[in-house]
């Protein structure tokens, strides 16, 4: 009997180790990938490249990239810029070929790419990367390009595990400020910040996350950690990003996550804060 109990215990231990291993699939997925990495993995069937933009859609893009127009993952309910509901977001992403097992690589206009990364993270997809340098760097290096064809995309299967707290509310912002815990990071310009801001917010302009804003090349992780520390936000620390409409703050959200912060994005941002008549400082 004792032998049977030992064997059963060992079996449970092995099963637990196996489950633990299965629950850590994202450990091999970097948050930021280079164009060289993408060139090496472009034909990997598990890699799904998503291209998002707000402007011209006729230019050739990275070969095999699937278009996800910015307006397809946003809502303008009540005249406010916000995320679509989870079910609607999932439908858009499945049409673009996204499954839970996909390694999704995002690129496009900086704010649109940040927004799409945030949407995927909010839905609980844990295999997402941002492409460093975008399509301009890809073209400069002679990477293959083609005009995206949505009709050629195989539909994905994506079951979300929504992380509600990542989409911060005004109440969450007030609670964090009232508790004196964590940092509130304003992604807007100096002029906007000086004109009016949420009390206690520290200015970290969204373009400052780039070593080269024109080329969309991010600063190193070490440089980003130093930048956020200077704004009072250290790795592991709770932080909320905001801007005017939640777009620029989604780029800052990505950079803060890359730097190791426990970050969420206040999508309602300054527009909602002002509309609610909440306190402001200048």
Image: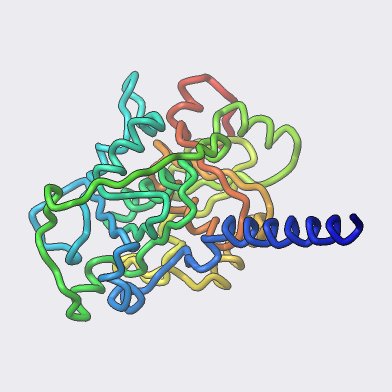
Residue 58 on image: x %, y %: 8, 54
Q: Nearer the viewer, residue 242 or 172?
A: 172
Position of residue 73 measured from the top left corner of the image (x, y, whole percent): 31, 38
Residue 94's image quarter? top left
Q: How is the image coloured?
A: rainbow
Question: Which one is in front, 270 or 124?
Answer: 124
Point 25% across, 73% down: residue: 137
Q: Is residue 127 above or below residue 214?
A: above
Q: In terms of depth relative to the viewer, which is nearer, 220 or 67?
A: 67
Horizontal side, residue 256 vs residue 18: left or right: left
Relative side of 45 to 19, left or right: left
Q: Does residue 188 show up?
A: no
Q: Residue at x 49, y 59 (%)?
A: 255
Q: Which residue appears at 35% of the width and 65% of the height? A: 131
The residue sitting at 27% across, 56% down in the picture is 108
Drawn side of residue 234 relative to residue 39, left or right: right
* Residue 259 seen in render: yes
Q: Position of residue 27 (x, y in %)?
A: 55, 65
Quadrant housing the N terminus: bottom right
| Residue 188, position as x, y percentages in the image | 44, 47
């Amino acid at each position: 009997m004792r032998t049977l109990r030992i064997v059963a215990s060992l079996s449970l231990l092995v099963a637990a180790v196996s489950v633990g291993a299965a629950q850590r699939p994202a450990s091999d997925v970097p948050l930021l990938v280079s164009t060289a990495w993408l060139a090496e993995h472009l034909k990997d069937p598990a890699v799904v490249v998503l291209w998002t933009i707000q402007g011209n859609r006729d230019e050739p893009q990275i070969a095999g990239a699937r278009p996800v127009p910015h307006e397809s993952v946003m809502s303008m309910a009540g005249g406010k810029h916000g995320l679509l509901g989870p079910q609607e977001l999932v439908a858009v992403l499945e049409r673009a070929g996204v499954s839970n097992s996909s390694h999704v690589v995002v690129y496009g206009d900086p704010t649109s790419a940040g927004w799409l990364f945030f949407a995927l993270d909010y839905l609980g997809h844990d295999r997402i990367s941002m492409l460093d340098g975008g399509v301009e760097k890809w073209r400069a290096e002679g990477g293959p390009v083609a005009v995206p064809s949505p009709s050629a995309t195989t539909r994905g299967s994506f079951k979300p595990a929504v992380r509600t707290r990542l989409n911060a509310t005004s109440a969450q912002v007030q609670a964090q400020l009232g508790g004196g815990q964590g940092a509130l990071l304003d992604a807007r310009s100096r002029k906007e910040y000086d004109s009016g801001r949420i009390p206690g917010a520290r200015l970290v302009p969204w373009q400052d996350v780039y070593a080269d804003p024109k080329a969309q090349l991010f600063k190193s992780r070490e440089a980003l950690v130093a930048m956020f520390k200077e704004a009072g936000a250290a790795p592991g620390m709770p932080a909320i990003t905001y801007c005017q409409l939640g777009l620029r703050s989604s780029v800052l959200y990505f950079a803060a996550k890359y730097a190791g912060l426990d970050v969420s994005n206040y999508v309602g941002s300054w527009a909602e804060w002002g509309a609610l008549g909440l306190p402001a400082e200048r």
